Each structure stands twice: as structure tokens, then as C-alpha cells.
């Protein structure tokens, strides 16, 4: 009975994570792989398979969203390397191959998760880092952030908007 309860628990946790983040992870992969739906589906499936296996082995996640994005980013990189390897072994014969080459180059120019965090740490103040984490990593609502920080909801919205502008201005040359 305890084994079944444990299985139900991680099945429930997996299902909740998939419902919350499945579409987001798929769109993340799709954007990184230049709208190649097949590759994006593969990367998304592999990401959630790893998540499921780790849950099944008893691992707990304080922030499953961050784990899923890091894992998806790693699978996108692997897919990119696979594309590069296939392109180097073949002569481009069609527009599809040229499209794959463009995809590979754009992925190469994009920041990986750790590099992105390093750049953010360099350009953001402590207050901006906290705001960024609450809004974009923890995915908290503006209402809850304004309550936590003890500021007006409109002021919080303005701060988040300015934070986005600053990030775009500083990291505009990178595809994020």
C-alpha cells in the first residue's frame, strides 16, 4: 500500500508539473529550434521523461520549472549538435537544409541558461534581481509581488516593465 501511495504521489506531482509547464516547455523548445515542431516535441518529451524518472527515484524539486527549463535547454543543445553533425556530413540539396543551417547558427548565438544568469547578475541590482526572480522564475502574480514588497500594484507593474526594458537593452544582441 505504501508503494502505491508513493507512486500516486509522484504521478500526481508529474501530472501537475506537466499541466503547468508542458505547453511552456514545448514553446520554449519550438522557439529555440526555429519552429521545427518535430524536434520541439522530441525535446519536450525527453525533458518530461527525465523529470518523471527522477521523481520516480524519489527526488524532490523545490523549483520544478527551473529544472524543466534547464533540462529542455540541454536537449535543445543536443539537438543542435545533432543538426550540425548531420549538416557537416551532407551537402545541402534543398531549402530545408539551408533552413536547418540557419537554425543551427541561431541556436549557437543564443545564450544558455547559465550564461544568461551570469549576464543578469552583472547588470541587475539586488532589488531588480529579487523582482526578476519573483516574477519570471517563481512566476508570481503582480498582486502577490506588490504585497510581498509592500508597494502599490501600479508601481510594481512599472518596475517590472522597466526591468524588462533594461534586460532587452542590455542583452538585446542575444536571443533570449
Image: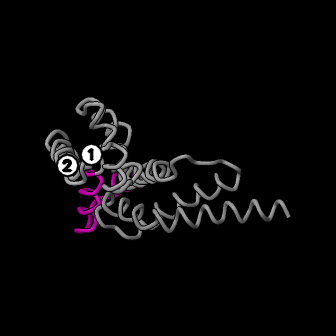
Look at the image and say whether residue 105 sits in the magenta stretch.
yes
Identity of the residue drawn at 41% across and 65% down: 26
**Res. 151 mark:** 1
Q: Quadrant of residue 154?
A: bottom left
Q: How is the image coloured?
A: one colour
Query: Measured from the top left, where is residue 141 in percent x and y?
Result: 35, 57
Q: Position of residue 94 (x, y in %)?
A: 24, 68
Q: Locate residue 66, reporting x and y percent.
A: 46, 48
Q: Which residues are magenta?
A: 85-106
The mark found on residue 155 in the picture is 2
Distance Cα–Cα, label 2 vs label 1 = 7 Å
Q: Secondary structure at mark 1?
A: loop
Residue 89 visible in image: no
- Judged from the image, the secondary structure of the residue bearing numbered disc 2 is helix
Q: Is residue 2 magenta?
A: no
Q: Quadrant of residue 34?
A: bottom left
Name the residue located 70 percent from the left edge and 50 percent from the top edge.
58
How would you classify the magenta stretch by its main secondary structure? helix
Q: Please indicate whether residue 38 sits to the left or right of residue 150 in the image.
A: right
Amino acid at each position: 500500500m505504501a508503494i502505491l501511495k508513493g507512486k500516486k504521489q509522484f504521478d500526481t506531482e508529474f501530472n501537475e508539473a506537466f499541466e503547468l509547464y508542458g505547453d511552456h516547455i514545448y514553446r520554449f523548445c519550438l522557439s529555440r529550434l526555429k519552429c521545427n515542431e518535430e524536434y520541439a516535441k522530441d525535446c519536450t518529451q525527453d525533458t518530461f521523461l527525465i523529470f518523471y524518472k527522477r521523481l520516480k527515484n524519489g527526488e524532490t524539486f523545490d523549483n520544478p520549472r527551473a529544472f524543466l527549463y534547464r533540462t529542455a535547454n540541454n536537449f535543445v543543445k543536443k539537438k543542435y549538435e545533432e543538426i550540425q553533425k548531420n549538416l557537416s556530413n551532407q551537402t545541402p540539396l534543398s531549402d530545408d537544409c539551408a533552413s536547418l543551417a540557419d537554425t543551427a547558427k541561431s541556436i549557437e548565438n543564443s545564450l544558455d541558461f547559465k550564461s544568461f544568469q551570469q549576464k543578469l547578475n552583472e547588470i541587475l541590482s539586488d532589488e531588480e534581481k529579487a523582482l526578476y526572480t519573483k516574477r519570471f522564475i517563481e512566476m508570481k502574480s503582480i498582486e502577490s509581488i506588490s504585497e510581498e514588497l509592500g508597494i502599490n500594484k501600479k508601481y510594481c507593474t512599472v518596475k517590472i516593465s522597466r526591468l524588462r526594458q533594461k534586460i532587452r537593452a542590455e542583452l538585446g544582441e542575444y536571443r533570449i
